[in-house]
Amino acid sequence: MTDRHSKTSSRLLLAVILCSVSVHCDTAWSRDKRSDDHNPLEAVVSGLSQHVTKMAAQLSLLQTKFDASQKQVAFVARNSADPFNVAAAGTLAYNVADINLGGGFDTVTGVFTAPTSGLYVFSISCMDVQRGRDEDIGVLVDGKRVCGCYSYSQEFSIMGSGFASLHVNAGQRAWVHLFRDSSRTIAGWYGNTFAGFLVKTDD
């Protein structure tokens, strides 16, 4: 009787345990199916999707900055006549551009228009051609003088040069102005030149 009682008790205990497990599983399953519960996998996928979108935006911004940094802007201008006369307005008309990367220099007006914002370098050379005369020119950026060049001819012509480094915004203009010359006749070809180039674009 003892063995039978023991076996019966064991079976009853096992049945109770199985029922308990079954009820727990059913309860957990029902809880997972509630409409207000969050699916952990969906949360992970949503987080990854947001991260990918953010990374794509950052990559696009970096690509834009890289493309801008590769932009080449440079020009070297002169006048094909030697000597040549400067108009009364005082702007030197450089009608030849040996280099014009970026297309910013206009050989009709002699004016450079910055195609992009950044740090630029401008340089000029000057040489007067008439004995006893002098030449005073300078680079203007939107009307403000940023550098100068002076030449004086006595027994022979002396060449001068000028240099400027400054920030220029896209659309700003630069040109060379004659401030003083007794005859407004100066050396052409490479006696008077105007050059510039972009060092670095704005970030």
Image (spheres, grey):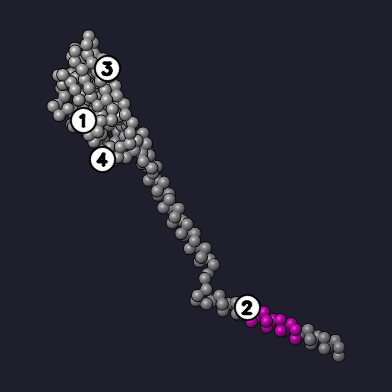
Of tags 1 and 3, the one toward the viewer is: 3
> What residue is drawn where x is 29% and y is 21%?
161
Query: Total number of numbered labels?
Result: 4
Residue range highlighted in magenta: 12-25
Q: Is residue 154 left or right of residue 56?
A: left
Whichever of callouts 4 and 1 sits on the residue coming sooner in the sequence is 1
What amino acid type is highlighted by mark number 3? Answer: Met
Of tags 3 and 2, the one toward the viewer is: 3
Q: Is residue 183 left or right of residue 194?
A: left
What amino acid type is highlighted by mark number 4? Answer: Gly
Task: Give the SS element for disc 4.
Answer: loop
Q: Quadrant of residue 40?
A: bottom right
> What residue is drawn where x is 28% and y is 30%?
146
The tag on residue 25 is 2
What is the x, y in percent for residue 158?
26, 15
Residue behind mark 3 = 159
Q: Quadrant of residue 181?
A: top left
